[in-house]
């Protein structure tokens, strides 16, 4: 919301430097986003002048050489390009040295050989309009040389304010004046609608209004005017609109915009002669019904949108945008001024469904108070007469009326101290509440909010008003600890540990994009039809699904860094993959750790070593199995199993997958389902005695067929080894050729209650050897 | 006899001292202390001496032998030591060469580092850490957080929808209600996580980013406690001489609502004109407020009677904290995953 300071000061003038005023507003909840300067850089050098003579330039058809009295002994010679310049005019003059709105300093110039000491101004040149067809003729009776800013608002400071969505009342100059009053205590002028000049009466001859959907249109008011003279608005009004960021159009349209900016209530002006039958019907639209709006676009409506019909059908989209058919234009002489209250959520829905946001919809979607409708009618009425010479016709049609008065809210002033931490005296609370228009009862046990504050309807809302105006920044900072020690959960600690293990092994963590598209699945060679979470309104087609796998993100980062000369990036991501629900519930996310190796280390067992390191650090017992997955090399992929649950994968990335990311070097990857692994990690381990009785160690080399998995050999050994076998691990593999290989194992035996002897272990060893022979046709290697 | 012992001892001492090599020393040892040497033989013959002689001679001979043996050991140690010194002196490596094999150094992503740093500060203040679903229901993301049916954030221009009832969460706040449903009061929790908004990517916007939600509810937690907690946080993250400023604001699910600014640390470091706070002196870091009673109404049956419990909540952006703290100019850097960027932090 842009609020020109000169406009604001008409209603409240706190007499503070601009920056201080801005701080007060910021610190009471209306944040100043920026301070702007609108108009000329400095008012110095801008004066009122009189054109004494205007002669044709000797060398240029379109230029005039003017002698202009600017209140000095000698008139100034100014060359002017405007077609309308003529002797006798009172004009606005910029003298050499004047600073224009864009910051340039005017100098003495020579135009086609003729000296020009300044410039006769058009309205766009000082930011008070957009017209450049001719110079401004001033309708003022002041001596030449009078400073221009005393008769024209050629410069103003502008506050750009952030208005929070609960405060539509502040989307108006008078609303901000109220806030300034509450924040500074400066006197607030009576509202501009205090006097309504319009004739009384509840009807207009020849006009009828019917509201078919009062739930969506709580109030609809209309006033009519005849003898309307269309034309440009006066400069003061144009200047205010320009400073507030609104383009002037014509007096009637400018009045609707001006009144909206002043009161916060949108208005719409119909050309009454173009309202067929003089009747308006407010009704729900039909599905698929087209309407042509002011911007000449055809919009297709649905049954939850509200249209305004005349006898010929839809003429405007209620509360959002007027229709082209009944728009006011140069030939308009009769105007029907509509000011209505709409159901906010409905307007909001209509405006986003149609992709049509306007200043009007931005206010109407906040469910304004029905009372504001008549405030706006009153201000508009005065301006229609003053600026357009209009004559009111009849009274005011008011369908729905102002609605009930605001209800008093039960209030406990002690709640302020309880919630905020520092009590505020009752008298002070009453003063602050009155400053925002509330009416507190004498004992402060009930407070009636003002009609324009529909956001204030509960005790908590009143507490907030008191707290913000009393100054939340003045509150002390108190620090005491909550009721227990803080900390990470065991699973959260395990997750950090897992990430730290990879960092310690030289991996860089990356963060990938949650969004992907269906080509990701093709790139990963996943069969069509894989279930994914789809976004209805993605930013682009390429971001239409939530990634079902993280591998693509990491491969993308690998490719990015390879292309930038990193030889063997080692990257991982610790993040979420997403999956649709099977049972109609919410989609789920799974926290996974995905690592990728490139180059020399990029082997299946190289990848597995990192899985072992992570799961070993977390003490999650697992076993490994050969597996064949679409994104992995068919012979070099493994699954990580805890009992029978798969909690990880590893392997060399399938060359076609790597190629999809333009990676032509070997790549290996691994996945650990961190959600599960961190849960499976033991929270606490208990002491085992391993020092009182030493372990007995022996090595064994067994020859088996090379298609017997090493894990199976270990499993056979472990099962046969029974309780005494503490550990069996492979330390060497020797390929013998002819489909046979030798696996060498370290075995460690231990008993908790005695030192084992060779005699104790011999039968166990025999059992192991027998089991190897029987189950995997293993022979001891000589 | 005693004189002979002295003689033998002196002779032996001289030869041991003169020995230059291990072999010479061994020769001296054999000659003076070996099986056939005179001194040991003297000792063996003590028994044959007159009784009054035995004590004196035995003692003297024994002393001489012990002394000589010690001398040999000493010489031997000295020789070995000299020999080792000589060997080591010739065995030299240029230690300015790189270590081998090179041990790669990895790093956490700056956003993870920052998230952990924030978590650790709040853990120190007595909070626990929770997480929640990124794809969540409209109910938790908007309705139960007291968002007006017309609240602009609900619009499909602003929020990603999976279906009419399901969104990509637009903030970490849906976990407020989820957490209260699962945990009776009192609670003190922070909730970090990824959130989504339909913003075009630019230097300060991204359709997904990260937030940390904080919430403390008990019977008597106040706005001054919020200020104290956030002041402690700001000082832990941005430096001990920071101040915080609390400004009224609006959020649908807190009341009173505030925005919290931290005093500019860049100005304090001396940078003029300051690019970080734009010469305001304050930098907005988060939104917060007292939990709105309407939010408690959604979890009343879980022990949150709004007349009995009260507390505050806040939400801050992790990217924003990282960008401010490390003077990172462009949010896109976080998701480009360029190692030249990643290796600068942590």
Image: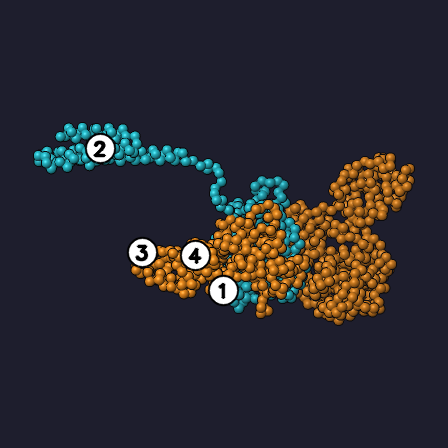
Chain colours: A orange, B cyan
Q: CA distance from mark 1 to mark 3?
A: 37 Å
For disc 2, the marked residue is B31
What's the residue at 85%, 62% (across, down)?
A334
Kindly indicate whether the residue at mark 2 contacts the one at mark 4 (C-beta within 8 angstroms).
no
State the mark number for residue A609: none
Kindly indicate whether the residue at mark 1 contacts the one at mark 4 (C-beta within 8 angstroms).
no
What's the residue at 61%, 46% (across, down)?
A564
* Above or below, comparing residue A169 to residue A76 in the picture: below
Are labels 4 and 1 on one chain?
yes
Q: Badge 1: few (under 14), some or many (20 or more) residues near its Cα, within 10 Å?
A: few
For disc 4, the marked residue is A742
Image location (x, y in percent) of residue A431? 61, 56
Q: Secondary structure at mark 1?
A: strand
Q: Is residue B204 visible?
A: yes
Are labels 4 and 3 on one chain?
yes
Kindly indicate whether the residue at mark 3 contacts the one at mark 1 (C-beta within 8 angstroms).
no
Chain letter of mark 4 equals: A
Q: Earlier in the sequence, mark 4 or mark 3?
A: 3
Image location (x, y in percent) of residue B240? 51, 46
Q: Badge 3: few (under 14), some or many (20 or more) residues near its Cα, within 10 Å?
A: few
In the image, farthest residue toward the bottom: A212
For disc 3, the marked residue is A692
Are labels 1 and 2 on one chain?
no
Of residue A601 and residue A132, the one placed in the foreground of this image is A601
Chain letter of mark 1 equals: A
Question: Which image quarter is the C terminus of chain A in?
Answer: bottom left
State the mark number for residue A645: 1
Q: Badge 2: few (under 14), some or many (20 or more) residues near its Cα, within 10 Å?
A: some
Q: CA distance from mark 4 to mark 1?
A: 30 Å
Q: Secondary structure at mark 3?
A: loop
């Amino acid at each position: 919301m842009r609020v020109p300071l000169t406009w604001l000061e008409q209603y409240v003038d706190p007499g503070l430097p601009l920056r201080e005023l801005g701080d007060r507003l910021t610190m009471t909840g209306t944040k100043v986003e920026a301070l702007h300067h609108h108009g000329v850089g400095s008012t110095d050098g801008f004066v009122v002048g009189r054109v004494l003579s205007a002669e044709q330039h000797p060398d240029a058809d379109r230029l005039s050489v003017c002698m202009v009295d600017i209140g000095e002994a000698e008139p100034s010679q100014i060359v002017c390009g405007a077609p309308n310049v003529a002797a006798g005019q009172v004009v606005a003059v910029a003298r050499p040295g004047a600073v224009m709105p864009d910051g340039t300093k005017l100098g003495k110039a020579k135009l086609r050989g003729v000296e020009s000491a300044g410039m006769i101004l058009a309205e766009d040149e000082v930011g008070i309009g957009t017209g450049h067809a001719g110079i401004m003729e001033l309708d003022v009776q002041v001596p030449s040389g009078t400073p221009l800013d005393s008769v024209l608002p050629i410069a103003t400071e502008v506050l750009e304010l952030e208005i929070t969505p609960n405060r539509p009342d502040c989307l108006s100059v008078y609303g901000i004046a109220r806030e300034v009053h509450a924040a500074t205590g400066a006197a607030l002028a009576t509202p501009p609608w205090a006097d309504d000049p319009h004739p009384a009466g509840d009807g207009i001859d020849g006009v009828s209004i019917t509201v078919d959907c009062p739930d969506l249109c709580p109030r609809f008011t209309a006033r009519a005017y005849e003898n309307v003279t269309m034309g440009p608005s006066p400069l003061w009004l144009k200047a205010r609109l320009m400073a507030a960021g609104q383009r002037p159009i014509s007096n009637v349209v400018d009045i609707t915009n001006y009144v909206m900016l002043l009161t916060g209530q949108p208005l719409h002006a119909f050309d009454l002669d173009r309202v067929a039958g003089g009747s308006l019907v407010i009704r729900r639209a039909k599905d698929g019904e087209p309407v042509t709006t002011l911007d000449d676009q055809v919009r297709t409506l649905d049954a939850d949108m509200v249209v305004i019909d005349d006898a010929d059908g839809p003429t405007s989209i209620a509360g959002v945008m007027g229709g082209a058919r009944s728009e006011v234009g140069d030939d308009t002489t009769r105007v029907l001024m509509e000011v209505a209250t709409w159901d906010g959520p409905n307007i909001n829905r209509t405006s986003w469904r149609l992709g049509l946001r306007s200043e009007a919809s931005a206010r109407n979607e906040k469910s304004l108070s029905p009372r504001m409708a008549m405030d706006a009618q009153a201000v508009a009425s005065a301006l229609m007469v003053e600026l357009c010479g209009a004559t009111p016709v009849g009274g005011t049609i008011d369908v729905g009326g102002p609605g009930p008065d605001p209800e008093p809210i039960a209030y406990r002033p002690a709640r302020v101290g309880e919630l905020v931490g520092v009590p505020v005296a009752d008298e002070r609370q009453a003063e602050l509440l009155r400053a925002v228009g509330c009416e507190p009862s004498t004992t402060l046990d009930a407070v009636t909010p003002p009609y324009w504050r529909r956001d204030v309807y509960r005790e908590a809302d009143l507490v907030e008003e008191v707290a913000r105006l009393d100054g939340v920044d003045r509150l002390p900072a108190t620090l005491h600890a909550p009721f227990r020690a803080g900390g990470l959960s065991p699973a959260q600690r395990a997750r950090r540990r897992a990430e730290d293990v990879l960092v310690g092994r030289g991996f860089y963590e990356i963060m990938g994009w949650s969004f992907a598209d269906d080509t990701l699945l093709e790139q990963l060679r996943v069969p069509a039809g894989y279930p994914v979470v789809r976004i209805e309104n993605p930013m682009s087609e390429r971001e239409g699904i939530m990634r079902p796998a993280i591998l693509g993100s990491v491969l993308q980062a690998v490719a990015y860094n390879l292309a930038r000369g990193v030889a063997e990036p080692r990257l991982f991501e610790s993040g979420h993959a997403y999956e649709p629900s099977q049972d109609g519930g919410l989609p789920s996310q799974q926290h996974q750790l995905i690592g990728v190796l490139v180059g020399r280390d990029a082997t299946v067992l190289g990848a597995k070593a990192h899985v072992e390191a992570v799961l070993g650090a977390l003490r999650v017992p697992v076993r490994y199995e050969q597996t064949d997955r679409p994104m992995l090399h068919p012979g070099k992929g493994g699954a990580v199993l805890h009992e029978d649950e798969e909690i990880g994968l590893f392997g060399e990335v399938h060359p076609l997958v790597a190629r999809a990311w333009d990676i032509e070097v070997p790549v290996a990857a691994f996945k650990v389902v961190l959600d599960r692994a961190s849960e499976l990690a033991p929270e606490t381990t208990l002491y085992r005695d391993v020092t009182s009785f030493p372990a007995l160690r022996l090595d064994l080399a067994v020859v088996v067929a090379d298609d017997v998995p090493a894990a199976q050999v270990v499993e056979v050994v472990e099962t046969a080894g029974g309780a005494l076998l503490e550990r069996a691990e492979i330390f060497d593999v020797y390929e013998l050729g002819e489909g046979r290989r030798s696996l060498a194992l370290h075995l460690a035996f231990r008993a908790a209650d005695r030192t084992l002897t060779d005699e104790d272990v011999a039968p166990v060893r025999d059992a192991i050897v027998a089991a190897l022979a029987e189950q995997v046709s293993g022979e001891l290697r000589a | 006899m005693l004189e002979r012992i002295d003689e033998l001892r002196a002779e032996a001492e001289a030869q041991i001292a003169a020995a230059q090599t291990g072999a010479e020393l061994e020769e001296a040892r054999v000659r003076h202390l070996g099986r056939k040497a005179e001194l040991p033989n003297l000792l063996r013959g003590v028994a044959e001496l007159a009784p009054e002689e035995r004590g004196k001679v035995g003692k003297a001979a024994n002393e001489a032998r012990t002394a000589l043996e010690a001398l040999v050991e000493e010489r031997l140690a000295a020789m070995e030591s000299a020999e080792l010194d000589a060997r080591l002196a010739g065995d030299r490596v240029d230690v300015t060469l790189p270590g081998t094999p090179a041990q790669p150094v990895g790093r956490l992503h700056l956003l993870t580092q920052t998230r952990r740093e924030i978590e650790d500060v709040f853990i120190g203040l007595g909070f626990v850490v929770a997480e929640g679903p990124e794809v969540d229901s409209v109910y938790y993301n908007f309705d139960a957080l007291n968002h007006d049916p017309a609240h602009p954030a609900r619009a499909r221009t602003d929020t990603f929808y999976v279906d009419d009832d399901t969104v990509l969460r637009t903030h970490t706040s849906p976990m407020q209600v989820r957490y209260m449903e699962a945990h009776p009061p009192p609670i003190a929790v922070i909730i970090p996580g990824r959130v989504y908004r339909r913003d075009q990517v630019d230097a300060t916007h991204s359709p997904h980013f990260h937030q940390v939600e904080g919430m403390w509810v008990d019977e008597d937690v106040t706005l001054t406690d919020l200020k104290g907690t956030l002041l402690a946080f700001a000082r832990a993250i941005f430096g001990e001489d920071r101040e915080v400023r609390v400004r009224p604001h609006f959020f649908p699910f807190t009341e009173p609502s505030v925005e919290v600014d931290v005093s500019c640390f860049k100005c304090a470091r001396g940078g003029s004109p300051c690019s970080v706070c734009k010469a305001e002196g304050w930098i907005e870091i988060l939104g917060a407020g007292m939990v709105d009673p309407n939010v408690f109404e959604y979890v009343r049956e879980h022990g949150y009677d709004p007349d009995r419990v009260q507390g505050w909540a806040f939400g801050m952006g992790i990217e924003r904290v990282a960008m401010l703290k490390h003077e990172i100019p462009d949010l896109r850097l976080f998701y480009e995953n360029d190692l030249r960027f990643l290796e600068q932090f942590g």
